[in-house]
Image: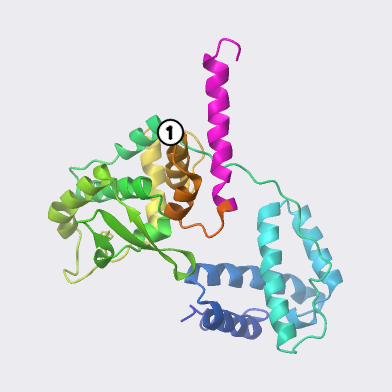
Amino acid sequence: MPSRSAGVEYPGRAVIEAYLQELWLEKGLSSNSQAAYRRDLKTFAAWLAPRGRDLLAAERGDLLAYLNYRLRQRLSAASTARMLSCLRGFYRFQLREERIEVDPTLQVDSPKQGRPLPKVLTEEEVERLLEAPDPQDPIGFRDRVMLELLYACGLRVSELVGLQLPELNLRQGLVRVTGKGGKERLVPLGEEAHGWLMHYLRQGRALLLGDPASEVLFPSQRGAQMTRQTFWYRIKHYAQLAGITKPLSPHTLRHAFATHLLNHGADLRVVQLLLGHSDLSTTQIYTHIAQQRLQSLHQAHHPRG
């Protein structure tokens, strides 16, 4: 079910929540996607309210004025493009349901944005990050195994914290991952991560469990499923301990997984399957990073570089 903002009133609440309900029924959006849609729609509704408009009365001029406002606020082109995509879907639905007569997003162009290359850790930096947690401490032991799995399997942080025991096949060395849109994929663990995981299941996990019947693979200190935000704070903590000063993102180890595979000769389509990308073009961004590395190596070591 969609996670509603129960009891909290805001401009456009009824129409927004009705739309999210329909989206959940039609597409099965994750709670994270629902929250992002709700945030974008609420923000636009709140901007319209002082101007005597509501979401269903907005016109193309309102959209253009809102885009101009975001530009003055120096909000990124990426976040504005995502917001506009959300509004397009919202108004197409309202038009289909005959609640409006004209889609105000028609002939409104998305802001142009370059596609930034993700910041990638070197293999040496990844090793330092993996070795930062203290495996003698139950929390550190859990975190070490989580980092090993994140890097070995190229998981999203949300996929990692949501892993359940039945999704492991230790005999075959595989993990079944449920990604975006509920799509499942099988990912090999790799020898190193497999070893750490076996050790953790034998000795470490039980020390963290408040509920012995729980199937959460990586419980929090309270024995419940960890949040993405909590684990991300843990990664930043270990990066600091490891002396890594590069800007990190929740996908840091996922980016490193893909880039390092390509650097060592992996096929792009294999990487696409491992990452769970539905479109190969999404994966191709990593080839640019690998090419940059090859160019820098050539310049550094070739006599005519």
Whether residue 281 sits left or right of residue 3 in the image: it is right
Q: Nearer the viewer, residue 94 or 265?
A: 265
Say which residue label 1 marks.
244
Residue 26 in the figure: left or right of residue 152: right
Residue farthest right in this picture: 61
Q: Residue furthest left?
A: 202
Which residue does the image show at 73% across and 78% down from the upper left?
91
Main structural element of the magenta stretch: helix, strand or loop?
helix
Q: Position of residue 77 (x, y in %)?
A: 71, 53
Residue 124 magenta? no
Q: Is residue 69 left or right of residue 180?
A: right
Image coordinates for residue 266, horizontal then vertical, percent: 44, 41
Residue occupying image coordinates x 48% and y 65%: 180
Which of the two residues, 87 or 221, is positioned nearer the viewer here?
87
Can the viewer see residue 31? Answer: yes
Question: Does residue 250 appear in this view?
Answer: no
Mark 1 Cα-neighbour bin, 10 Å: few <14, some 14–19, many ≥20: some
| Image quarter of residue 192 | top left
Q: Which segment did they paint magenta?
A: 281-305
Quick check: 264 above or below 279? Answer: above
Q: Position of residue 107 (x, y in %)?
A: 84, 67
**On screen, residue 283 above or below 81:** above
State which quadrant residue 170 falls in.
bottom left
Location of residue 113 with respect to 304 vertically, above or below: below
**Which amino acid does the dot numbered 1 rest on?**
Ile
Dot 1 falls on a residue whose secondary structure is: loop
Residue 282 location (% of width, % of height): 57, 52
Does the magenta run of residues contain 282? yes
